[in-house]
Image: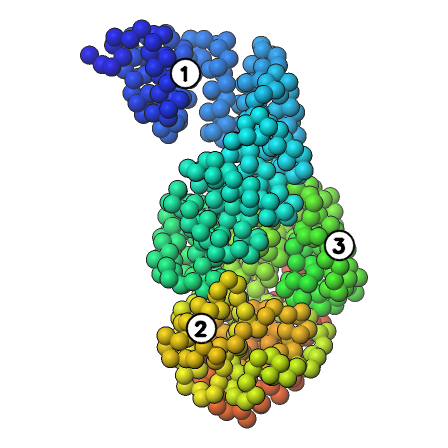
Amino acid sequence: MNAASHLSLDVLLERLTSLIETTAYAEAAELAEDALPRFPDSAELLRIYAIALHQIDRREDALGVLYRAEKLSPDNLQVQCNLASLEIAEGHADEAIERMRAALRRAPGSPMILLILGNALMAAARYAHARESYSMATHGAPNHPGLRLNLAAAELEIGHPEQCAIHAKEALQIAPAMGGAHAMLGHSYRRRGRYAEAAQAFLRAEQLEPAESEHPYHAALALDDLDRLDDAQKAYARALQLNNNNGAALSQRVFTLRRLCDWSELDLLSARLRAAVARDASGITPFGLLAEDASAEEQCHCAKTFATAIDAQMASLRRQLAFTHAVPAANAPIRVGFVSNGFGEHATGLLIVAMLEALKSSDLEIHLYATAPNDGGAIRQRLEAACTVHEVAGMNHAAQAQRIHADSIEVLIDLSVYCEGANPKLFALRPAPLQVNWLGYPGTSGAAWMDYMLADAVVQPDHLRATSSEKLVRLPRCFQPSDTSRALVPAPAREHCGLPAQGTVFACFNASYKINPQAFSRFTSILAQTRGSVLWLLSSPEGANQRLRDQALQVGIAAERLIFMPKLPHAEYLSRYQHVDLFLDTLPYNAHTTASDALWAGCPVLTCAGETFAGRVAASLLRHAGLPELVAADETAFVTLAVSLGGNHEALQLLRQHLEQQRTSGSLFDMDGYSSDFRRAVQAMATRRRIGRPAADIDIQ
């Protein structure tokens, strides 16, 4: 005799409902299955059974059971709502929309139907229609906090964070302890740059719903925005405790610990991260993996997994927008768009401004799409004088994509890809027929929406070709331009900079996440072998400086031999290179903009080429600066050469003289030449499309 054999149908249904409410789904499914032979014609029993099956991840079985219930009771609105919810979960939002609209004709104004219709419309990326559906539902259920919360979510997707906050607060008036409403308020604050309030809201949500891993994760992101890195990494750790498979929290925690130079758990966490990449864990940010000892193949795999998830997420909106791209006439000018949050006093702006100024007189039509507010600085003013700048910071992804498409951009260049302020969701909407990965992110996008990567033969040699998903366009010079209009102002005295009056000054002004235990060990080995030398580093956040000093002490290097430079205005920072004898690079993530800065300022850079794009940029800069001998063959040679140069001031002076000549006559800093090669690269990509040829690898000669 089974557990259901003695129960009446009413008692059985009451028992099943209780099990569902207490999340005892497996027990509910077993009890319902046992009871079905006694009550084969009960649509309600089948409906509850389907709910239990869905919760234990037997989705296909649940859908089949609900279809049986629908045959028994075709007018049962609860069955219709459950079917629509399952269809949404299975990616069939359009079917769910039609089902709920049919149900609404039978029960006009039903809050339950309008709620699920809104959910289906959200899944179909029809956010304005979803907002209308939720709003109508609130008339019939004014005290339903979930409806207000869904209304807030729709407003956020539309791009109305202020209205989102209003509805989230309405939900909290009805249900003050509703963690999801506090979290939604956090999203609205973060979207508006109100990071302290966002962190507070997410932390409150975590207090109210301590089992929900997304709350500490989003709290960590807001704390990161506030540069409260230690609090952020602790919040990421709490998210991981709640959900061991949270790839986003894992990758962000590892990266944050690297920024803090907190290496105590690094070996274990790094191995765990790479294992998560290998098993296709979702949410792992490709940018963070660049600082790990991961191969180019692993980086590509991670990027493809990340991009595939975004592609699926944006599929409904992409279908809705349904952009088409006409082929311009053969003699029509090429309209080139650049998308970035860095069109100002930012590394991106500094790198591209002189090149874009050189392109002003070309036959390319240049448009910049600024996803961050105008900072009003000198770089932004120069960019506005050279190009057409479009302010798109306040727009949602759909509006941004529509703007770009309306401008008939033929070649759209992503200057961020997966860096901070990235726009992969915008590019996944395919607003332009040719989309290019260039400059900001040193690696493959792994994305179906990216046609080309602009690189050079050093950062992307033939033997790494298979690790890029895009077609490669390789320039005949270093892929990275720079601002060659920068003046070099005199540096203050060494003592003013905290440096000793005499002795060799080694420096590494790379970001702290690039300095790993192996790189730091090379640095301290060089210091140990170079009497009277010091290591000048960029000051890092929240105790990172002291951690590095402690590490140095452990190998017998006095703490005072590590000197930390605070963040300075660019011209002042650039002047400090006059006191640096030799810049020491890092692996697996090289100096990029920083190496270019050093070379422009006349400071020699010593690097070691890795086996990923991110680990080969300095080698490309040095080769095109005529200094390939400063690319060490391996880490041992790196230390040997650094010690040799550190004690040979005549050699260092010769290197400086060479770089001074390169500043005016070398190819690395020739932005007229660079702009010409860049123009030819754009023409090659556009021409292939105009003549009906697919994207292909191109080496610009």
Front one among 317 and 199: 199
Is disc 1 placed on a helix, strand or loop? helix
Which residue: 73% across, 55% down? 374
Q: Is residue 417 visible?
A: no
Answer above or below: position of 483 versus 44: below
First reached walking from the N terminus: tag 1 or tag 2: 1
State the mark number for residue 389: 3
Quadrant of the image occupied by residue 171: top right
Q: Nearer the viewer, mark 2 or mark 3?
A: 2
From the viewer's perspective, tell me whether residue 45 is left or right of residue 645. left
In what quadrant of the picture does the N terminus appear? top left
Residue occupied by mark 1: 47
Residue 355 on image: x %, y %: 70, 67
Please rate how many residues cluster around mark 2, counting C-alpha atoms within 10 Å: few if below 14, some from 14 to 19, many from 20: some
Residue occupied by mark 2: 549
Which residue: 24% across, 14% down? 3
> Alpha carbon of mark 1 to alpha carbon of mark 2: how far?
64 Å
Residue 583 on image: x %, y %: 53, 78
From the viewer's perspective, tell me whether residue 631 is left or right of residue 331. left
Residue 388 on image: x %, y %: 77, 55
Front one among 462 and 298: 298
Front one among 502 and 129: 502
